[in-house]
Image: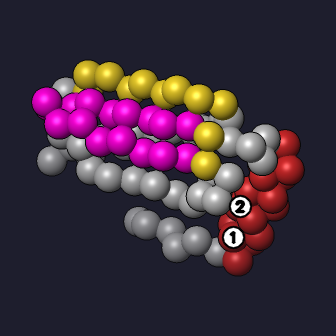
Amino acid sequence: MRRLPSLQDTVVALQALSLFAGLTQSNTDMTVTVTASGETTTYTVNRNNRLILQSSEVRLPLYCIDSRGIGIIVWELSYLWR
């Protein structure tokens, strides 16, 4: 059974995001490169988009994740078995 997010979940997430924003550097300037199955995707993270989710679907196997620059990023991989 899948549970829908509640208002409390949203409030907790917004509080965590606000705390994260206050603790991280505002001069973030990073490039993150993800290589999977021969395809490369590059993400740019800077002070204007550092709190915006950037995502894409990648094919396994995942070969390399490379980040360069200054700042903090959170990276997550979700895998769905079919």
- Label 1 sits on residue: 10
Looking at the picture, which amino acid does disc 1 mark? Answer: Thr
- Is residue 31 found left or right of 47 in the rendered image? left
Q: Residue at (75%, 65%) from the top-left corner? A: 14
Give the image location of residue 53, x and y in percent: 52, 57
Q: Residue at (45%, 35%) from the top-left corner? A: 32
The magenta segment is 30-45
Q: Nearer the viewer, residue 63 or 7?
A: 63
Give the image location of residue 44, x and y in percent: 48, 46
- Label 2 sits on residue: 13
What separation in Å lies between label 1 and label 2 (alpha carbons)?
5 Å
Looking at the rendered image, the quarter that the N terminus falls into is bottom left
Give the image location of residue 31, x and y in percent: 48, 37
Q: Quadrant of residue 15?
A: bottom right
Image height of 5 relative to 56, above or below: below
Count of number-bearing discs? 2
Q: Residue at (46%, 55%) from the top-left corner? A: 54
Give yes or no for contact between labels 1 and 2 (Cβ–Cβ under 8 Å): yes
